[in-house]
Amino acid sequence: MQRPRPLRARPQRSFLSALLGACTLYPITFSWVQLAGKYGGGTADPENAPTVSGSCPSCSLHPYHHDGTLVWHRPIPDRVIPAGWEDDWMLRWKAEQFDSNSTRVPRCVMDEGPGNPYDDGVLCEMPGYIPARIVDGKKHKIPRVIFLSWFTRKIGRAMFTSIMSLVTINPEYEVILFVDDDVDRFVCESVGEDFALPLFSRVRRAAGAMRIDIWRLLVMQKYGGVYLDSDLSALAKLPIEEGDTAVSGVCGFGYLPADDAGETKIGGALEHWSMCFSRGHPFINKAVEHLKRNLREPEYLMRNDTPEAKVEDSFTMRLTGPAMYQSALIEILNEAKCKEEVQEDGDEGGRNYADALKEPEKSCEDMATFREWFPEGLRLFDWLNLNQTVTHKVFYPGGSWLKETEDFHGYSRYDNDSPSEYVEAPDLSFCDADSMTKRRYERQEAWAEAVKHKANQ
């Protein structure tokens, strides 16, 4: 077996050339020190490192440190320091993931041996928890934490580069990467078995998109913060300010049929692939209500002869994804008597609520009701992807991110879903320790199968 070798560092380059270079033979080669200093809100110069307020007796005394991957502009903690948004469960989970010796740092190696399912020979690892590297001392209504999820923390170069762009350009944010085992534990232990057993246990384990549709809403409801799809890359700092309670771009298109079951779509939706909310935000609570209703009574949405299926052919999108999310939003806007704009032409034609979202004072008769669901602090952008601060496109020319997904999992879940991904009978043993262990072994076997499949190609 060929021994893994660390990827080489290259001289300083421009941000654009670094992005383009991320997709070459040595993908993770630009210096994160350089990137963080120039684009990450700080400086790579120890003498100009910002002063960190507060005391941390158990922290390193050096105000600046580069551990080989991450740039720190604060004392490096030797234990988990609560940020204030966590509950006891999350603090315990963080403690499990935290390594004071910094051995669990993001890294990539060239490993063409039999233990790597990715066919380009690059194997990367991400830690489950990365603390914030800068602490500004301000109290933000939207906690400064980014939630991500993937099948495993052994990832390919395209996804690694995407995640590291988020980490580096947003050093004020903690980053939490849940894998499937973490998702199960969170739903069973933190959300509770009254949801996990009758509803979540019915989602097939292979239905990754549906599972994360559910998880992202539950995480936003319980903790708030930022949820991002794990294939999103950062182009600029997240556009979230102290007083914000909800931040999103506004889609002109829609996922729902018109009330008359005709051809006209209902447009105007918040981004589902990125979510930025305060803890327990009323709109998220409404969306969770719709989610639970769909999971309890999925029969109608499982049919393929409905107006909903005509507009959105993905069962997952209808049951737990953007269509469900938009249905909660449209219910609120109708309750607030918000007027829609009727557009006749184009892909975004139909009844469109985008203007009502952006200027509710002009479009909604019942502003009191609107504010019940969207209190002060709503920040919306005409541009999607959080005002183009993140993007799906930078790091996969030639479909490299999708190729990595196929290398590991076989296919893209949203494109190949079916009602069979949600089974009729709940698994009442889902939260038992033995059941958890069994699923963990099954996922390890799935990794081994992916490796075996690559070896036989």
Image: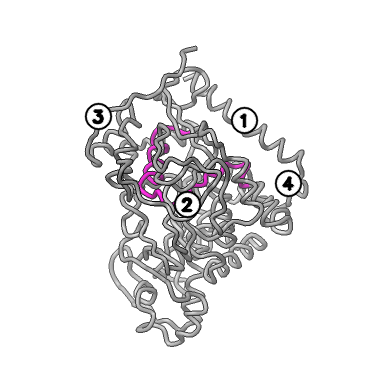
Residue labelled with disc 2: 146
Mark 2 or mark 4, which has the lower sequence index?
A: 2
Q: Residue at label 3?
A: 11
Which SS class for mark 1?
Answer: helix
Instruction: Tell me how far mark 3 sits from mark 1, CA to CA.
Output: 38 Å
Q: Which residue is at 54% across, 22% downward?
A: 452
Q: How is the image coloured?
A: one colour
- Measured as percent of width and height from the top left, residue 391 is found at 34, 50
Task: Give me the residue at 52% from left, 47% from top.
Answer: 176
Residue 405 is tagged as: none
- Locate residue 252, reporting x and y percent: 35, 66
**Is residue 113 part of the magenta span, yes or no?**
no
Q: CA distance from mark 3 to mark 2?
A: 29 Å
Q: Residue at x 34, y 39 (%)?
A: 396
In the shown orientation, is residue 256 left or right of residue 236? right
Which residue is labeled 4 in the image? 430
Q: Is residue 215 left or right of residue 242?
A: right
The answer to whether marks 1 and 4 mark residues whose Cβ atoms lie closer than 8 Å is no
Along the polypeptide, which appears first: circle 3 or circle 1?
A: 3
Give the label on residue 444, or none: 1
Judged from the image, the secondary structure of the residue bearing numbered disc 3 is loop
Magenta stretch in the rendered image: 155-183
Amino acid, disc 1: Gln
**Among numbered discs 3 and 4, the one appearing first in the sequence:** 3
Q: CA distance from mark 3 to mark 4?
A: 50 Å
Residue 312 seen in the figure: yes
Residue type for callout 3 = Pro
Of the numbered discs 1 and 4, the one sitting upstream in the chain is 4
What x and y, as percent, mark residue 19? 28, 39
Foreground disc of the pair 2, 4: 2
